[in-house]
Amino acid sequence: MYLVSVYFDEKANKILQRYIDKIAEVTGNDFMTSHKVPPHMTISAIEARDIESLVPAFNSLKNKLKTGTIDVVTVGQLLPYVMYGGAVMNEYLLDLSKVVYEAFKDVPDTSISKYYQPLSWLPHITLGKTLGKNQMAKAFSVLQESFAPISATVTRIGLAKVNPHEDVATFELN
């Protein structure tokens, strides 16, 4: 599995990282921090034999994508073990999803997850992962006390391997 993810401006990144750190602190679950998973939003999840087959499609995005603003307005859970910050699906995110999908949909021997296709995608930023039942409750409690909606500017995009998260290619958006 490979991911196409976007990253945020420094101010939003610090706020999101603070939430990730708080969850790790109160739950004792340091998956996100020990695996050095940065705050990001996955735009596409792609099954492929190797990442090299995806690099040309990723590079084709360079002149097609621009920076944009998203609003992270809520927290949620992907049961049974993920806490996330939820973003409003705005025109920018919808267009981003469509452009990324179009770039990768015809790459041979690949499959794009049905949960990361245009109009079938929940824009979210994972704040805690692999949380147990009690950890989920603690994570929700700490976010209930500290979360406030933020606007974030998407500034960079990356093509990454998972487990551990490792960017293979990235570029800044105009």
Image: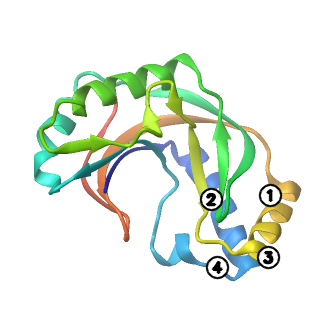
**With 146 as the anchor, is 63 left or right in this view?**
left
Q: Are marks 1 and 2 in contact (CB under 8 Å)?
A: yes
Q: Earlier in the sequence, mark 4 or mark 2?
A: 4
Please state which amino acid type lies under the numbered disc 4. Asn
- Camera-side residue: 109 or 126? 109
Label 1: state its secondary structure.
helix
Label 3: state its secondary structure.
helix
- The image's mark for residue 155 is none
**Residue 61 position within the rendered picture, expressed as x and y whole percent measured from the top left:** 24, 29
The quarter of the image holding the N terminus is bottom left
Task: Farthest residue to the top: give it.
Answer: 91
Which residue lies under the disc numbered 1?
143
- Camera-side residue: 59 or 43? 43
Please state which amino acid type lies under the numbered disc 2. Leu
Label 4: state its secondary structure.
loop
Disc 3 to disc 2, C-alpha distance: 16 Å
**With 34 as the anchor, is 62 left or right in this view?**
left
Q: Are marks 3 and 1 in contact (CB under 8 Å)?
A: no
Which residue lies under the disc numbered 2?
127
Q: Do the residues labelled 3 and 2 touch (CB within 8 Å)?
A: no
Q: How crowded is mark 1: few (under 14 residues within 10 Å), some or many (20 or more)?
A: many
Q: For marks 4 and 3, give the one nearer the viewer.
A: 3
Q: Residues within 10 Å of mark 4 (few under 14, many from 20)?
A: some
Q: Earlier in the sequence, mark 1 or mark 4?
A: 4
Disc 1 to disc 4, C-alpha distance: 15 Å
Q: Which residue does the image show at 59% across and 30% down from the upper left?
A: 70
Q: In the picture, residue 44 is in which quadrant?
A: top left
Disc 4 to disc 3, C-alpha distance: 11 Å
Which residue lies under the disc numbered 3?
134
Disc 1 to disc 2, C-alpha distance: 10 Å
